Amino acid sequence: MLLRSGKKLSHKNSCADIDEINEDVITRLPVDVLKKILCLLPESEANRTRILSYKWMEICAFLPNLRFVMPSCVSIQQANKFHSFVDATLAIRGTEPIKRFSISYSKICNYRRADALLCTLVSQYKVQEIELMFPDDHRKRIRFCWPLFKTCETLVALTLKGKFVLDVPGDVLFPCLKKIDLGMEAQQVSSSVWKDTQLGEDRHLMNKFRETV
């Protein structure tokens, strides 16, 4: 009985060793190869690899598309940890341009830091697509920082979900915008949203306006 038990234990240990070796082999692949592998995965699965190790978190930071989902927070301190995580990811990335950036916030979040993040995306990362989602909270109406886009020459797609106030200044330009998705409560909608966009025959406009309560 003792010998048989020992054999089983030895077998389990050998399997664990094989798994460890296999993980090392994958991790030792060139970073460019690992990036390509992650790009082939669905975003949700690629993002899960961040928890494997710091190296995988670094690799995820350099993917062309970044997606963040804030967990439900019970305090502003918890929310700030999420904001800090996003900032740390961008710090790892440096100044490499971002193709698509998607972020979803919970009801408790630091709106000043969310605004600062958007400023960083536009000014430093030449982002092409932005998806910004806030929860439907009747207590808060978010004023989108349209002046950021006065000289933004990279944005081709913009998605806003939540209760935004669309008081768009007349001097805001969208020189490259081809797609805009406004899934929000339309309190104020200015015609200047569309006036200066370069929307051709391939335009894809999804206006999901709900009546103001």
Image (tube, rainbow, N blue to C red):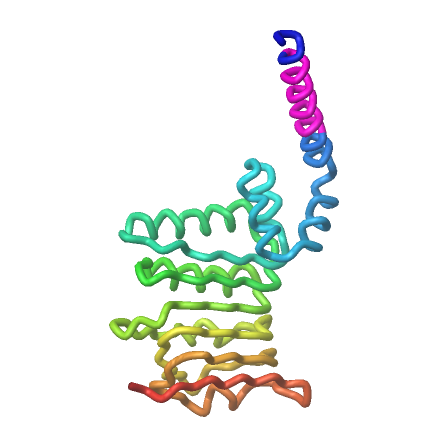
Q: Is residue 120 left or right of residue 188?
A: right
Q: Position of residue 70 (x, y in %)?
A: 42, 56
What predominant SS class does the magenta segment belong to?
helix
Q: Is residue 85 left or right of residue 158?
A: left
How many numbered marks does the figure carry?
0
Quadrant of the rendered image containing residue 59: top right
| Extreme residue toward the front, this view | 1
Q: Position of residue 99 (x, y in %)?
A: 61, 63
Work out whether residue 112 or residue 52 is closer to the camera in this orientation and state it.
52
Residue 12, above or below 77:
above
| Extreme residue toward the left, this view | 139
Quadrant of the rendered image containing residue 198: bottom right
Q: Quadrant of the C terminus?
A: bottom left
At x 53%, y 58%, the residue is: 67
Residue stretch in magenta? 6-21
At x 55%, y 37%, the residue is: 54
| Extreme residue toward the top, this view | 2
Q: Position of residue 112 (x, y in %)?
A: 33, 61
At x 56%, y 47%, the residue is: 48
Q: Quadrant of the N terminus?
A: top right
At x 40%, y 84%, the residue is: 169
Work out whether residue 95 or residue 30 is closer to the camera in this orientation and state it.
30
- Asked if residue 14 is among those painted magenta in the image, a careful observer would answer yes
- Asked if residue 49 is among those painted magenta in the image, a careful observer would answer no
Work out whether residue 86 or residue 16 is closer to the camera in this orientation and state it.
16
Residue 146, above or below 42:
below
Residue 147, above or below 96:
below
Q: Position of residue 210 (x, y in %)?
A: 39, 86
